[in-house]
């Protein structure tokens, strides 16, 4: 990146002139890029332009450009609606719990896998923990429904036998059980896959460091804490920023599929709400406004985390 | 394994603590293994067991009263096969389209002499963090007249920015710059260089991306839910949702929610469907696992 910046400084001509020159010189590259540029323009940038719908009344004839300007009417409508506090709270709670529980899990798993000395067993564990990642969300949710079913679910019965869950609780239909269920099954599914990146980082640690540690008399635990862990901190920070940037981007799919009339109080989040009002009930302007609110909050979180991370560790995205 | 013993003080305590540590690692890894593997194993044995026994919790470690009722039911239900067919179409055509768009773009962005690359890169990366949201995207698709067509399910997410970054990073770092200079001296164009030199050298990243995209299309359910309402176009995941989660009756009337025998056989059908729909991915998985890992690592170079 920095090399390119230097190049750019050397050629300090107006952007238009430079672009024209580039178009002539690298026209073949531009052609190769064209399909991607057009696709992104149509399906990402046109909808961004369509965000103006959030500030306008929807009219059928005007379509995506929107009807008359109404300012913040639809935002106010959302903020004043009875759904505002619950959807925002549920979204935050679910994402926050997901990050707090789900973020460290693959790191710990990677550390454990990295410490397994028996290569065959290591391979078996690695192969197994990656598998759930490939299960589709529909299948995942139906597995949850089967395994946690009230009186015949194997897992719910097991949890009741060891008294982790009271015997009269219906896990699938209890509001307070929704978030743990959502988050823990999410960890089950993605922990293995997310650990790959840390395992890769761990395997690239300089082996001389381990030898030095041994000579200093450190045991395996100390080696892990003082050598392995610091080695993956940059990776951890980058992933943490990316995760924080998506704080309100809780997966629509899984929550939508896990929703039932009994847990709706804990499971209605912004994205499912946007789907219900925006697409299902065709309140296009209102849905756009709620969606935009979601995107903006995400963007702010991303910027803040990136800024904090740069301050503290010197690692950042931008 | 350089477990050479070093003479020195404290060697005994270190051995002891290391042994405890080693034991803890093994116990923890076994625990993780069981937690991950058991639910998967359970679905398999439940799919071939008598579902009444499954429902009273008698089936735990091995199948009992083996029967293939669930699988027989699936073979009779045309919805599943229509869904399968559609999904295969979306996976094959969609993935080819993904590759045709992503690979040249990744190549162009990997060229260091391409002056606009940072600007163009920003153009792509920005969409990772900011988007118009569901409703405006839906309106866009709708104004293009693509709602409920097979086309939208094929072209939707024709290029994924994260995959583009993986592609660019790979081509930037794994293909020697000397080759390009030599090719230029021979009067080679970008097109020709891309086709004859870059593509053959990019097999690793091509397989990684094709797999990423294919798994995405296979498991994609969201786009079909939003942009399609025609049963003829429904991919497998939508059909699965109808049967597994909405408890829609089977063709022969079995599988509704009316308890009794209907309910228990419906459950067995569910287990069997889970297996049948996940099997293709799990079958190829062992062969492609190393590519997946490689993909994550290429991507990790520059997130």
Image (tube, coloured by chain):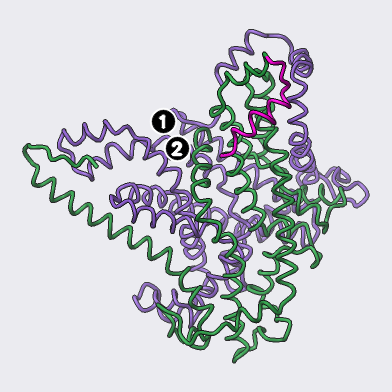
Chain colours: A purple, B green
Image quadrant assignment for residue A228? top left
Residue B242 on image: x %, y %: 69, 72
User: Among all residues in the image, which is located at the extreme bottom?
Assistant: B260
Q: Secondary structure at mark 1?
A: helix
Q: Is residue A140 placed above or below B101 in the rendered structure?
A: below
Q: Is residue A71 placed above or below A270 in the rendered structure?
A: above
- Label 1 is found on which chain of the structure? A
Asked whether B203 falls inside the magenta stretch, the response is: yes
Image quadrant assignment for residue B30? bottom left
Residue A189 on image: x %, y %: 49, 59
Depth check: give the residue in front, B110 or B55.
B110
Depth check: give the residue in front, A288 or A31.
A31
Residue A65 on image: x %, y %: 86, 42
* Residue B115 in sight from this viewpoint: yes
* Residue B129 in sight from this viewpoint: no
Count of marks, rendered view: 2
At a point 73% along the width and 31% down the height, the residue shown is: A33
At a point 81% along the width and 65% down the height, the residue shown is: B230
Q: Is residue B77 left or right of residue A223?
A: right
Which residue is labeled 2 in the image? A237
Q: Secondary structure at mark 2?
A: helix
Which span is picked out in magenta?
B186-204
Q: Earlier in the sequence, mark 1 or mark 2?
A: 2
Residue A84 on image: x %, y %: 64, 56
Q: Is residue B47 left or right of residue B225?
A: left
Q: Are the residues tagged 1 and 2 within 8 Å (C-beta)? A: yes
Which residue is labeled 1 in the image? A313
Mark 2: give few (<14), some (14-19) or many (20+) Cα within 10 Å: many
Image quadrant assignment for residue A261? bottom right
- Label 2 is found on which chain of the structure? A
């Amino acid at each position: 990146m920095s090399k390119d910046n230097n190049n750019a400084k050397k050629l300090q001509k107006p952007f238009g002139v430079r672009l024209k020159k580039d178009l002539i010189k690298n026209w073949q590259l531009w052609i190769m890029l064209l399909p991607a540029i057009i696709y992104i323009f149509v399906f990402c940038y046109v909808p961004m332009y369509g965000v103006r719908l959030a500030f306008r009344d929807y009219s059928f004839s005007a379509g995506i450009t929107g009807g008359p300007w109404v300012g913040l009417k639809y935002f106010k409508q959302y903020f004043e609606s009875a759904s505002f506090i619950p959807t925002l709270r549920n979204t935050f709670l679910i994402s926050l719990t997901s990050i707090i529980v789900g973020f460290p899990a693959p790191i710990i798993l990677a550390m454990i896998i990295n410490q397994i000395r028996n290569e065959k067993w290591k391979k078996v564990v690695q192969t197994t923990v990656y598998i759930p990642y490939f299960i589709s969300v529909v299948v995942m949710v139906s597995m949850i429904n089967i395994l946690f079913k009230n009186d015949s679910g194997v897992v719910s019965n097991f949890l009741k036998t060891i008294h982790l869950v009271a015997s009269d609780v219906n896990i699938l239909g209890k509001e307070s059980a929704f978030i743990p269920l959502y988050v823990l099954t999410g960890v089950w599914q993605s922990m293995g896959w997310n650990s790959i990146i840390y395992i890769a980082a761990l395997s690239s640690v300089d082996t001389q460091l381990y030898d030095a540690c041994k000579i200093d008399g450190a045991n395996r635990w100390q080696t892990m804490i003082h050598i392995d862990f610091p080695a993956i901190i940059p990776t951890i920070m980058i992933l943490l920023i990316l995760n924080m940037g998506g704080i309100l981007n809780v997966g629509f799919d899984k929550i939508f599929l896990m929703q039932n009339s009994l847990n709706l109080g804990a499971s209605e989040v912004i994205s499912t709400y946007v789907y219900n009002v925006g697409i299902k009930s065709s309140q296009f302007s209102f849905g756009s406004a709620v969606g935009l609110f979601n995107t903006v909050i995400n963007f702010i979180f991303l910027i803040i985390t990136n800024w904090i991370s740069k301050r503290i560790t010197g690692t950042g995205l931008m | 394994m350089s477990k050479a013993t070093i003479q020195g003080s404290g060697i005994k305590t270190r051995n002891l603590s290391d042994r405890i540590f080693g034991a803890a690692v093994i116990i923890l890894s076994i625990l993780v293994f069981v937690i991950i593997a058991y639910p998967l194993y359970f679905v398999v044995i439940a799919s071939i067991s008598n579902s009444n026994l499954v429902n009273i919790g008698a089936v735990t470690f091995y199948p009992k009263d083996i029967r293939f009722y669930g699988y027989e039911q699936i073979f009779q239900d045309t919805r599943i096969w229509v869904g399968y067919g559609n999904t295969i179409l979306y996976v094959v055509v969609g993935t080819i389209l993904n590759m045709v768009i992503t690979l040249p773009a990744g190549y162009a962005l990997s060229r260091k002499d391409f002056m606009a690359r940072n600007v163009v890169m920003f153009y792509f990366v920005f969409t990772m963090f900011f988007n118009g949201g569901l409703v405006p995207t839906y309106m866009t698709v709708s104004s293009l007249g693509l709602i409920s067509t097979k086309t939208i399910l094929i072209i939707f997410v024709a290029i994924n920015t994260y995959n583009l970054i993986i592609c660019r990073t790979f081509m930037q770092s794994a293909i020697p710059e000397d080759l390009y200079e030599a090719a230029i001296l021979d009067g080679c164009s970008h097109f020709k260089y891309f086709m004859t030199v870059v593509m053959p050298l990019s097999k690793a990243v091509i397989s990684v991306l094709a797999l990423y995209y294919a798994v995405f299309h296979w498991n994609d359910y969201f786009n079909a839910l939003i942009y399609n309402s025609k049963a003829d176009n429904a991919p497998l995941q939508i059909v699965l949702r109808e049967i597994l989660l909405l408890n829609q009756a089977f063709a022969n009337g079995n599988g509704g929610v009316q308890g009794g025998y209907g309910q228990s056989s419906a459950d067995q059908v569910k287990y069997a469907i889970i297996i049948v729909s996940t099997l293709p991915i799990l079958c190829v998985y062992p062969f492609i696992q190393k590519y997946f890992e490689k993909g994550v690592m290429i991507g990790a170079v520059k997130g």
